[in-house]
Amino acid sequence: MVTRIIVGLALGPAFLAALFFLPPLALAILVALIAAAASFELLRATKVAHHNGMYIFTALAAAAIPLGHGLGYSSWTARGVALLLMAVLFFLAIRLYGTAGEIKFEHVMVCLFGGIVIPLFLSALIQLKRFNNGQFYVLLPVICAFTTDIGAYFAGVFLGKHRGVTQVSPNKSLEGYIGGILSGCLFMLVYGLLLAYFEPIEVRLPVMALYGLLGSAITELGDLSFSLVKRQYGVKDYGSLLPGHGGMLDRFDSTTFAAPMLLLLVEVLPAF
């Protein structure tokens, strides 16, 4: 846990620099790198047929979608990349059908999920940046993911009694899940109070609490969802790129769910 926190704190300055001090495109590049690494890790973990083209084109598609959002061509890029990736994957599958390197349909679906769905969801971070005071909105899913994770861990360690709520993570307790959600709500309110105090921003605290409630709930669902994939394919971590965290997808699994949820909430019910 200590290593996990240290690595998280080391990555923090890079993210904050891209968010507050570098040109807007820097955030898109950072998200593109995260999405490309996450898609590669997903294909490797799910034992997709090891055809180089599938890995390369999926990673390129995953990187292109956030970059398209950063350059202002989000809709066009997403449609174009999705069509191109699907065409390439099925071309390879048709070409290799009946051979020793045959590509199964489920492998194509995993590539489409890793190359399109994950980067589209992570691109919500880039879209949040476009709102007024967008740099503070971008931090919403980050805070949700981090504080829910920490809150669930400590609540589970000190209060956890009812374990085995789900066999996906049998060691996690009901108290841990509840503690994670409450922690997310609490720290979202603290974040709102800090914004109101240090920035000339009028913050609607009840809305911030709603952000924390729904954001933390979807964060825990995201964590369990990607854990389900790992359990089904018999892997402990998606990779080893980030010591204490595993792979890029291990670190950003919950953010993949939280970012689009917070984007939707901000669009419907802005807090500031």
Image (cartoon, grey):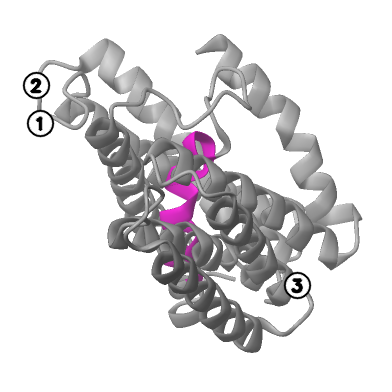
What residue is pinned by disc 3? 70
Give the SS element for disc 1: loop
Give the SS element for disc 2: loop
Q: Residue at x 34, y 42 (%)?
A: 226
Identify the magenta region: 249-263
The amino acid type, in three-letter code, at marker 3 is Gly
Depicted 54 relative to depicted 180: above or below: below
Mark 1 and mark 2 in contact? Answer it, CB < 8 Å.
Answer: yes
* CA–CA distance in space, label 1 to label 2: 7 Å
Q: Residue at x 52, y 36 (%)?
A: 251
* CA–CA distance in space, label 3 to label 1: 40 Å
What residue is pinned by disc 2? 162
x and y percentages locating residue 84 in the rendered image: 57, 79
x and y percentages locating residue 220 in the rendered image: 32, 43
Whether 258 is among the magenta residues is yes
x and y percentages locating residue 37 in the rendered image: 62, 45
